[in-house]
Image (tube, coloured by chain):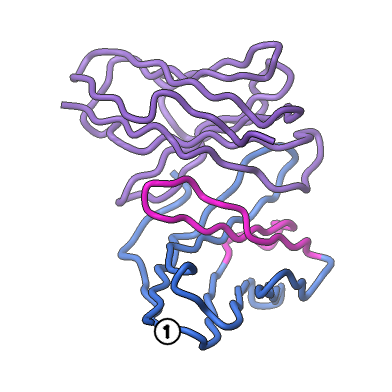
Amino acid sequence: GESVGLHLPTLSVQEGDNSIINCAYSNSASDYFIWYKQESGKGPQFIIDIRSNMDKRQGQRVTVLLNKTVKHLSLQIAATQPGDSAVYFCAEKRDQGGKLIFGQGTELSVKP
Amino acid sequence: KAGVTQTPRYLIKTRGQQVTLSCSPISGHRSVSWYQQTPGQGLQFLFEYFSETQRNKGNFPGRFSGRQFSNSRSEMNVSTLELGDSALYLCASSLDGSGKYGPQHFGDGTRLSIL
C-alpha cells in the first residue's frame, strides 16, 4: 500500500498552549490537502482543507499552512483543549475522484 | 443531517470465510470510498465508487471487492479471509466525486477480527 504506518510521533502540550502538527506529503502533483482528527473508537473527522493555490487557511481555532516548495503541511491549533487529544492525519489528493493518501498520523496529548 | 453509517460495528470471522460490510453515505453524497486502517500500515485506500461504478482502486488483491447501489449505498466484500485482513474498515462519502475538491466524511468503521 501507499500509506506506511510507523510508530506514531507524539506531541504533548499543556492545556491553553498552541499546538503545531507537521506533515510532509509525498507528491508534488498533489493539489488538495485535508486534515483529519481521529479519536479512539471513531472514524476520522474532517477539520480543515486547503487547495494548492493557497498558502494559508484559517478555521475556528485552527490554521493550516502549506509550503509547496518543501512539500510540507502544518496544522496549528490555538488554545489547545483536552478535547483536542486525538490522532491527527494529513491527507493529500492528486487525482479526480476519491483517493486520499494519508500520512502516518501524529498523536496529540493535552495535559490539563 | 445523519453522518456516514457503517454496519456492523464489529465482526469476528475465521480464516477462509467471507464477509460483507455495509455503508450508507450522507444523504446527497454520490461518491463512496473505502479504506483499511491497521496499526502497521496506517490508512490505505481500497476503492471508490461513483454512480454505481468503481472509479479508483488501490493496491489490494482481488479478494477485496465492492459495489454501489442506485441509492449510493455501498457494500464491500472480502473473500477467503486471512489473518492479515484484521483491521478497521472505514467508509467515506463526498458530495461530488466528479470534482477533485471537497472533503470526504468518514463513518466510524467496522472492526473486523479474523481468528
Which is more toward the observer, A99 or B19? B19
Q: Quadrant of the N terminus of chain A?
A: top left
Disc 1 residue type?
Val
- Horizontal side of residue B58 vs B30, given as left or right: left
Residue A8, quarter of picture: bottom left
According to the picture, the residue beneath numbered tag 1 turns out to be A13
Residue found at x 51% / y 88%: A17
Residue A40 falls inside the magenta stretch: yes
Q: Chain B is which colour? A: purple
Residue found at x 56% / y 50%: A101
Residue B79 placement (x, y as % from top left): 34, 15
**Chain identifier matching the blue colour in the rendered picture:** A
Dot 1 falls on which chain? Answer: A
What segment carries the magenta color?
A: A25-52
Residue A45 falls inside the magenta stretch: yes
Residue A68 placement (x, y as % from top left): 71, 72
Residue B26, quarter of picture: top right
Q: How many marks?
A: 1
* SS assignment at label 1: strand
- Horizontal side of residue A108 vs B92, given as left or right: left
Residue A111, quarter of picture: bottom left
Residue found at x 60% / y 75%: A74
The 10 Å Cα crowd at callout 1, few under 14, some 14 to 19, many 20 or more, is some
Q: Quadrant of the C terminus of chain A?
A: bottom left
Q: Is residue A30 above or below residue B56?
A: below
Query: Which residue extends farthest right?
Result: A53
Residue A79 placement (x, y as % from top left): 57, 83
Which is more toward the observer, A66 or B72? B72
Query: Which residue extends farthest left?
Result: B115
Q: Is residue B24 above or below residue B93?
A: above
